[in-house]
Image (cartoon, grey):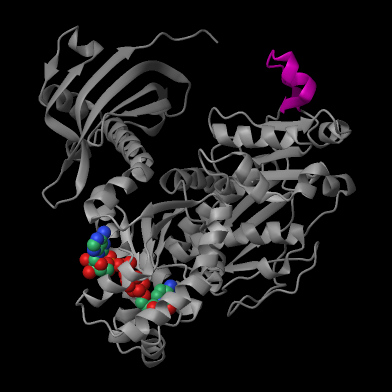
Amino acid sequence: MITRASSIQKNVVDEKFLQMEFADGDLAGGKNLVYESRERFGENVRKFCEHFVQVGGTVLMLGRPQAGAVWEVVSSGRRANDENLHSTFDDAAPFNDGDSDKQSQSKRFHIPQPRSLLAPEDMASHRTINVEADNFSGNGGKVMQLAPGDPLSAHASPSTTKSIGFIWRSLASVEAVLAGDVDTCRDEGGGDTWTVHAIPCSCVIDTSSRGASRSAAADFCCSLLQVYPSSEVDITMESEGQVNGTFVYEGASAAAYEMREKPTVIFVLGGPGSGKGTQCARIVENYGFVHLSAGDLLRAEVASGSEHGVMLQNMMKEGKIVPAEVTVGLLQAAMAKSGKNKFLIDGFPRDEDNRLTFERVTGIIPEFVLFFDCPEDVMEKRLLNRGEGRVDDNVETIRKRFKVFSCQSVPVVDYYERLAKVRKVKSTYPPDMVFTNIKPYFTKFLEADVLDATRKLVKAIDNGDSLTYRKFVDEKLTAYEPEAQGHLVEGLPFHLLWLDTVDQNTQEDKRVISRICSPWVRLLGENAAIVGYARLFQAAKGPVVSTSNETRVWERRKSEDGAFEWKLVHLHRTTAPMWDT
Ligand SMILES: Nc1ncnc2c1ncn2[C@@H]1O[C@H](COP(=O)(O)OP(=O)(O)OP(=O)(O)O)[C@@H](O)[C@H]1O
Ligand SMILES: Nc1ccn([C@@H]2O[C@H](COP(=O)(O)O)[C@@H](O)[C@H]2O)c(=O)n1
């Protein structure tokens, strides 16, 4: 059984979830759970694994550690497979957390490097799974006829956005091969060829000197490196001049930083007229998401006179769900065009086919599903009063749409409910009240935004980039910092002087860069936040040269264009002691 981090949602790991997710037999039989993560481990993932172990399972955690994260193999003391774990992870050292009670229930090991995606039984037989070139002509989304161990190659589109989707699909394909899951082994085809030879694998990327595909290639390497330890991945980048692997590795890290995560997607569902569009407008205004309404995209497609226009119009008049390929294609194009990475996808997925097609094509799993709960009589009244001249806002079609919703869309909501991903809001109240009830689900995005602003600001300071610096900082910034010798400094000139003296032409190996470590965020209401962290200053090619502790106070305001932005209003920095190593 392979479980992804994203399906273990924050704050929802409880008995109910476990019972829904895993049949009794799975747990009672002491089955293995191979937990594969490309995401940061949180407290809930740990709890989840511990629980799984307590009910007799074994958990292997595979992937790459994030800074500061502890990778653990949690193994049930009641099972006799500890040896197996030792031989799989031969450099794993027992971890003694001093809690002897717990130790008798389960043993933990720190693994410095995860080894592979293979489950222990596969490791034991050392089956090598070849993932090679030229066995798959992927044009047109052909389904590959694969059995476990069969070779696989894949093709990537030259467009970066599509390629990112490919990366995840490609990794999903590798997993699918491992699991013998032929259905998942699809690819859309076209473009460059990326070759993954085996696990341990090597990867040859022909960039053909195209910018987009080069950066996609870097992303791909990065994804590989997140899943496989670098010792097992050998990356070569072929282009004019034979750029070597080191370049790609560094490129991959940079790309990983810029595009740390796949886009964040929230699906917005609810019956016709439940108020999805109304609330999405508020979420966009307050939390900076891009709103994509599947229905609006389809109506625009009809209006554009496209080849599918007549068919789409007829289906919509009947309240029917149009083919998923069309809707997903429109959504994908709109996401790429926006250049943004946070999306509210409204009125989607309307049925299982919508959901599966979206997952297959984009590889994106939604952060959560915002669901508006509203009785039919209320929705009908609203739609009849909407007055937007839509072809489907008449009693006859409205009733058909209700039927389609309960027969085809509700099962999708149930599916996400089983993954504990549904955030239900009653939408019979007035719009402002509905929005108040939605807000708590979006707090974490405010925290992420303010942390992102902090990172960008620190980067601007490192680069002597006063233009970007000014974008993030209030003119009346106040600061306590060692350079000010105990005085409160007000305004920007003191800081700009420092920025201007950072010599951007300094030789690369003499530059000092800084890194934010152990950050924390505390929101003070919706419009203020405190961010704290340790900042390590490093020579670009050398060890840490100094450290400081910084606290920054941010205020969220509306900018001239009406969007919210974070502005730094106060800074406190102290020099932190250095440790002898
Ligand atoms: N909480 C509410 N109270 C009263 N009226 C509302 C509320 N929310 C939305 N409405 C009104 O109901 C109508 C339908 O709302 P909206 O278009 O947001 O629904 P929807 O779920 O997006 O519908 P559809 O699925 O058909 O696109 C609109 O006229 C809107 O102004
Ligand atoms: N995923 C979707 C979304 C919509 N449709 C069709 O569009 C009609 C209107 O949708 P709204 O969300 O704007 O109400 C809907 O009744 C469907 O005909 C679709 O097929 N697939």
Residue 28 visible somewhere in the drawing: yes
Residue found at x 76% / y 27%: 92
Q: Is residue 121 left or right of residue 380?
A: right
Query: Where residue 440 sits: x, y (%)?
Result: 35, 42
Residue found at x 54% / y 27%: 68
Where ligand 2 lies, by image quadrant?
bottom left
Q: Is residue 92 left or right of residue 67?
A: right
Of residues 496 and 83, the one nearer the viewer is 83
Q: Is residue 119 left or right of residue 437?
A: right
Residue 234 visible somewhere in the drawing: no
Say if 581 sits above or below 8 in the image. Answer: above
Residue found at x 80% / y 49%: 25
Q: Is residue 93 left or right of residue 44?
A: right
Query: Where residue 215 sits: x, y (%)?
Result: 46, 56
Q: Quadrant of the C terminus?
A: top right
Residue 554 is covered by the magenta coloring: no
Query: Where residue 557 sits: x, y (%)?
Result: 17, 40
Say if 105 sits above or below 171 in the image. Answer: above
Say if 178 sits above or below 442 in the image. Answer: below
Of residues 498 and 11, the one nearer the viewer is 11
Residue range (magenta)? 92-109
Hey, which quadrant is residue 389 in on the image? bottom left
Hey, which quadrant is residue 84 in on the image? top right
Hey, which quadrant is residue 8 in on the image? top right
> What is the total number of numbered labels drawn onto the structure image?
0
Residue 104 is covered by the magenta coloring: yes
